[in-house]
Image: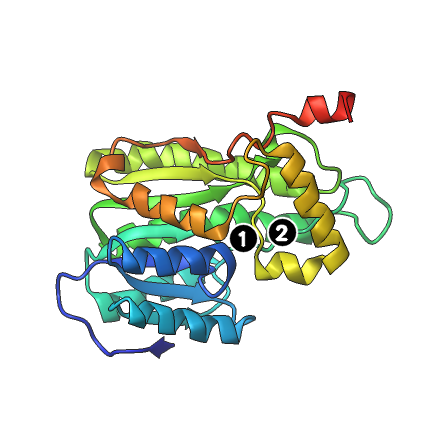
Amino acid sequence: MSDTEGRGAEGRQWALILGASSGTGAGIAVEVARKPGLDVFGVHRGRYAEQAERLERQVREAGRRAVLWQADASTPEAAEAGVEALREVAGPRSVKLFVHSIAGASVGHFLSEGEDRLHAKRVRRTFDTMAHSFVFWAQALVARDMLAPGARLLGLQNPLDDSHLSNTGLISASKAALEMYVRYLAMELGPRGHRVNLLKFGTVMTPALQHVYSPEARARLETAHSRMNPAGRMCTVEEVARFVGVLTGDDAAWFNGATIDFTGGMTLRLLDLVLNP
């Protein structure tokens, strides 16, 4: 665990972000450090060491504390240990924002006889990472009395539930489970003054995406999105991060149990593109 500034003063509020070292998680961490001004406890698996160091530096430059905790966040044991580590540096009732931004899904086909078969181990791993871990961390935060008054718990969603992409059935299924968890946790935490929501947005260019796709494939991806999106371009990590900052503020306090559409109309033209290519 890396603590850039030592113990903070009592009364400071924190953002707990799973998957904080790169991509959307890192973008959100930097944005909420700037506005509304939260200290950041980021959980990551250590795959992007340079990006993690950059994140710490950017949070410090915003005048906030950054604590990075390396672990596989998908297990209940990791949730309990991570929240305990956070409590040691932040104190109770300090988490204003919790963001679930970890990914670790398997792609493939349920009935395949080849290497892309979605066997039981892949199913369990995907659901633990993409859905169940949201519950594990919420339970640990409540058990350790870590949620600040009016805390916001936020899961991240994609538009795959609006259509069909051949090898992503397991991702879609796990995200559907996450959506149900959000709704039920909103009901349980709402009377306590907390809010639980799901933010749905389209494809953004992240280090993980750049690792998976070749430059040629990324160019095709951007071209396809420029045709799909009414704005004529892809959404950016920065735009998603700024909107999370908005959701953390008092003006968004009535959102609860919601799947908030931040896709920019990404799927509106799909039928038109198929019938009128």
Q: Which amino acid lies under the numbered mark 1 shown in the image of this protein?
A: Thr
Residue 220 x, y percent position in the rendering: 73, 47
Is residue 68 in view from this perspective? no
**Which corner quadrant holds the N terminus?**
bottom left
Q: Residue furthest left?
A: 10
> Residue 165 appears in which quarter of the rendering?
top right
Which residue is labeled 1 in the image? 129
Q: Nearer the viewer, residue 56 or 188?
A: 56
Which residue is labeled 2 in the image? 105
Q: Secondary structure at mark 2?
A: loop
- Label 1, label 2: how far apart the Cα atoms are: 7 Å
| Picture colour scheme | rainbow
Relative side of 171 to 237, left or right = right
State whether residue 222 is above or below residue 82: above
Disc 1 vs disc 2: Cβ atoms closer than 8 Å?
A: yes
Residue 144 x, y percent position in the rendering: 25, 57
Residue 62 x, y percent position in the rendering: 28, 66
The structure residue drawn at horizontal position 47% and vertical position 68%, both measured from the top left corner, is 71
Q: Secondary structure at mark 1?
A: helix
The structure residue drawn at horizontal position 64% and vertical position 25%, both measured from the top left corner, is 269
Relative side of 89 to 259, left or right = left
State whether residue 240 is above or below residue 190: below
Q: Which amino acid lies under the numbered mark 2 shown in the image of this protein?
A: Ala
**Which corner quadrant holds the C terminus?**
top right
| Figure label count | 2
> Residue 95 appears in which quarter of the rendering?
bottom left
The structure residue drawn at horizontal position 54% and vertical position 53%, both measured from the top left corner, is 129
The structure residue drawn at horizontal position 66% and vertical position 46%, both measured from the top left corner, is 222
Dot 2: few (<14), some (14–19), or many (≥20) neighbours within 10 Å?
many
Q: Residue furthest front?
A: 232
Dot 1: few (<14), some (14–19), or many (≥20) neighbours within 10 Å?
many
> Residue 209 appears in which quarter of the rendering?
bottom right
